[in-house]
Amino acid sequence: MCALLRELVVPVADLHRLAVKCDQCKTVTTLDFTTRIQTREGLAVPGLTECPVCHHSFNAGLKDRIQTLGTILEWMRDLGPETVSFRVPPPAE
């Protein structure tokens, strides 16, 4: 059996925005990772705890995951590869 994977190759320099969609009202909020703020704990990216429109609470771990993604993107821009590949398996039948 052979599985085909879809692949998207993106320059790391182009990865600077993240869209978060609210499950409740379907509003899409875009976070810009180029606007990092210096804090005592290090560099931080703007995080979300709730939808800015309907105020529905997001998953408690979302802010930590956004912070981790921002750190990884920063590392990749400074030290890592020029491109990143995303491989997506086909939908389950």
Image: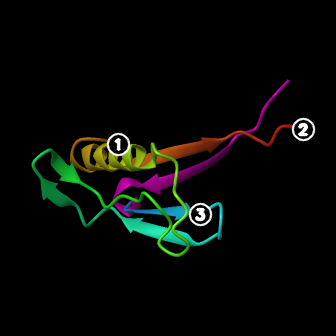
The image quadrant that residue 21 belongs to is: bottom right
Q: Is residue 92 above or below residue 45?
A: above
> Which residue type does callout 1 highlight?
Thr
In-front residue for pair 17/22: 22
User: Most extreme residue toward the right, as rendered?
Assistant: 93
On the image, the x and y values in percent for residue 37 come to 18, 61
Check residue 68 in the rendering and tell me which mark sits there, or answer none: 1
Report crowding for label 3: few under 14, some 14 to 19, many 20 or more residues within 10 A (C-alpha): some
- Secondary structure found at label 2: loop
Return the disc, 2 or 1, that comes first in the chain's sequence: 1
| Magenta region includes residue 13 | yes
Q: Which residue is mark 3?
A: 22
Q: Are marks 2 and 3 in contact (CB under 8 Å)?
A: no
Q: Are marks 2 and 1 in contact (CB under 8 Å)?
A: no
Q: Is residue 2 above or below residue 27?
A: above
> Which residue type does callout 3 highlight?
Cys
Residue segment shown in magenta? 1-15
* Image side of residue 7 versus residue 50, left or right: right
Return the disc, 1 or 3, that comes first in the chain's sequence: 3
- Secondary structure found at label 3: loop
Residue at the image position 50 percent from the left and 64 percent from the top? 19
The image quadrant that residue 36 belongs to is: bottom left
- Secondary structure found at label 1: helix
> Which residue type does callout 2 highlight?
Glu
Q: Which residue is mark 2?
A: 93
Q: Real-space Cα distance between discs 1 and 3?
A: 20 Å
| Nearer mark to the viewer, of 2 and 3 | 3
Which image quarter holds the C terminus? top right
On the image, the x and y values in percent for residue 9 come to 52, 51
